[in-house]
Image (cartoon, rainbow, N blue to C red):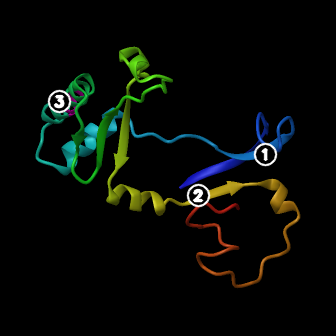
Amino acid sequence: MIEFKVAPRKATMGKMKGKTVYIAVPKGQQKISPEMVLERIVRETSLTEGDARNVIITLRNLILECARMGTGLDLGDIFSLRVNVPSKMEENEKDVCAKSLKAPKLTLTWKESVRKALKELQVDVDNPARKKGKKPESPDPSPKGEGSEDHTGPQAG
């Protein structure tokens, strides 16, 4: 679950330009460290720590090699990477050359299993302004719907 708080921002574009607007921002970012990844691989497979390190280093080297060569990389049901080199628009056909190309980027596309997991992400927005004016809840709120602290999907809390 990701917990959010409300933060003010000054709008820089659109119909609210120049006004103070409020957005939900994450309270903090949780990360799994490289050491934790290694420990988990060692615990859940028959690989030693050295073997797991070598696999991660080889994966990094593969990604670097694919980026240098402009080749795509498919990692099964996790994600695929492809190199994308956009082009500037030129007025004349003869003006299109290597200088017309913008900086290369890697495009990461998540596979179905990861997209499904993202749809199941639970979020909660801690908004004191909504809690102050809130009416008392009914004695029997629905288990996963409005009035419950455990929401699925991007709902304001």
Query: Dot 3 surroundings within 10 Å: few (below 14), some, or many (20 or more)?
Result: few
Give the CA separation, mark 1 to mark 3.
44 Å
Q: In which quarter of the image is residue 38?
A: top left
Q: Nearer the viewer, residue 80 or 131?
A: 80
Residue at point 33%, 59% (across, down): 112
Q: Is residue 121 left or right of residue 61?
A: right
Q: Residue 22 carries which label?
A: 1
In percent of width and height, residue 132 lies at 87, 61
Q: Nearer the viewer, residue 65 or 58?
A: 65
Type of amino acid under label 3: Thr
What's drawn in magenta, residue-wise?
Answer: 56-60
In percent of width and height, residue 81 lies at 30, 39
Q: Say whether residue 150 is magenta.
A: no
Residue at point 19%, 43% (across, down): 42
In this rendering, is residue 143 above or below 103? Answer: below
In this rendering, is residue 100 above or below 62? Answer: above
Q: In which quarter of the image is the C terminus?
A: bottom right
